[in-house]
Amino acid sequence: MTSAKTQPARGMRDFLPEDVRKREYVISVIRNVYERYGFEPLETPAVENIETLLGKYGEEGNQLIFKILKRGVHEQTGEADLALRYDLTVPLARVVAEYRDKVPRFFKRYQIQPVWRADRPARGRFREFYQCDVDVLGSRSMSVEAELISAASVALSALGFDDFIIRLNHRRALTAILMAAGVSLEQHDQALVALDKLDKIGRKAVQDELQERKVGQAAADQLLDFFVELGSLDHAAEIAAGESRVEKTQALNAATLGRVVEFVGSNELGAQGVDELRAILDFAAAIGAAKRIKVDPTLARGLSYYTGAIMEINVKDLPGSLGGGGRYDGLVGMFLGQDLPACGFSLGLERIIVVMTERGMFPATLLTTPAELMITVWSDDSLKESLSLATELRKEGLRVDLYPEADKLGKQFKYAASRNIPFVVILGDDERSRGEISVKDMTTGEQRSINRSLAAAELRRALSEREQNT
């Protein structure tokens, strides 16, 4: 039975070697894609001044910030002056304001670091987790949204996902819908918090929450009726069999935007939002990313700093999302004193890893081979020579483990098998006298001798053949 003294704090986790390898693999794939799009890396401190974070995430976000009490005698007051990083977007805004003269006019950055939220721990919900953000600051062009959608799509495809969609909406269009439904302006933030849960908890629960948040029943009914009606467009927009997925998606998006225009009427905000959504779809089509996009006017994204397009990635038959983001043109201005356009996207690294694990999407060698080969130790007298051989092979780029002490060969083989190491190198007295090594294939049990001077080349060839056969 596990002792509470050895368990990590609630909502926190220890990451064993296999967990770390999974995360590093996902990060390496995503980083490679983002850098091909011209994004640069950024890192910020785990701790921020509390005033940097407060007021940026809406009412629920403020309650989930991990506050750090003032030190010394001030601890007794319960006052906080610092806080753990809640997300990566607000720190980015602070950095751009602080180093405005040092960052490019169009600052494209990616950032992959842990964040902390004082949430109630549950299955799949942690108080410390990694975020994987990519943002563009300095441009109001809708090509930015299209590029972010494309980069996120390519990254997920590179990881092996092929059944995801990117839901797209616009805060101005959503504001116009709320107004057309009769939701008072002062109730918009409350309504958005509830609407953001529509795909997670369903109509009835959202309707109850809207009433709890003092949104009038007539307005709530009209709003939810409109969203239910939009759901029926999936069938109304079906077109003849044989036409491409892109054409079907374009037809559905056109029908959805047309219905939004009808509902909001002459509302200027709504017209601006729809125009920008159409521009994003056009740019996305130009770069081959349109087939993944579904315009979804129910998408709300609860964070209060979004000002324009909002996006979220969903996988078929999986609750929740793999990531999301949007445009936040006003956030940097809170620090800089002048508006700076910005748009970003965050992939849910932890969620991606969970789904990939459940679906068996990780490469087999990543999870089973901490080293490509292990060198045995024949005797205490031969330990130095085994160390020397390990060093030689590592210099040749091989991943080499060394059994740390003299032991029976059977125990050494058993240890290598327990760690799924594919090849074991034996450097016994006979091998040393002949200038050779023996190599045992732990899968087949075959053992053969190799000239020591050719060891690296022969081992690389054996590893290559094994990889081709798995």
Image (cartoon, rainbow, N blue to C red):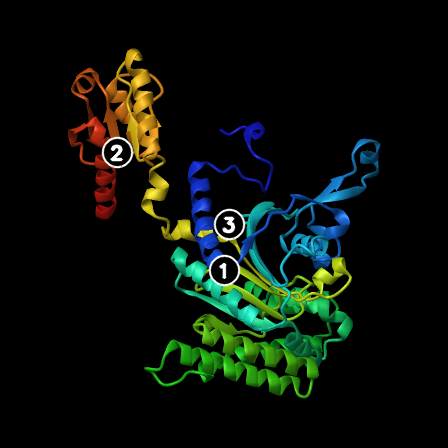
Task: Classify mark 1: residues with Cα within 10 Å, few (<14), some (14-19) or many (20+).
Answer: few
Secondary structure beneath label 3:
helix
What mark, if any, has residue 200 been given in the picture?
Answer: none
**Measured Cα–Cα span from mark 3 to mark 1:** 14 Å
Q: Quadrant of residue 215?
A: bottom right
Q: Mark 1 belongs to which amino acid? A: Pro
Rendered view: 307 above or below 456: below
Judge by depth and name the residue closer to the eye, 320 or 99: 99
Question: Residue 405 location, x and y as percent?
Answer: 34, 17
Q: Is residue 77 left or right of residue 164?
A: right
What mark, if any, has residue 350 been given in the picture?
Answer: 3
Task: Classify mark 3: residues with Cα within 10 Å, few (<14), some (14-19) or many (20+).
Answer: some
Residue at 15% over, 29% down: 448
Q: Mark 2 belongs to which amino acid? A: Ala
Residue at 56% over, 69% down: 145
Q: Quadrant of residue 278?
A: bottom right
What mark, if any, has residue 319 been given in the picture?
Answer: 1
- State whether residue 406 appears in this view: no
Residue at 52% over, 70% down: 146
**Measured Cα–Cα span from mark 2 to mark 3:** 37 Å
Q: Which of the two discs, 3 and 1, sits closer to the camera?
A: 3
Q: Is residue 104 left or right of residue 82?
A: left
Q: Which of the two discs, 2 and 3, sits closer to the camera?
A: 2
Judge by depth and name the residue closer to the eye, 194 or 129: 129
Label whose residue precedes the other's in the sequence (3 or 1): 1
User: Do tag 3 and tag 1 residues touch (Cβ < 8 Å)?
Assistant: no
Rendered view: 364 above or below 413: below
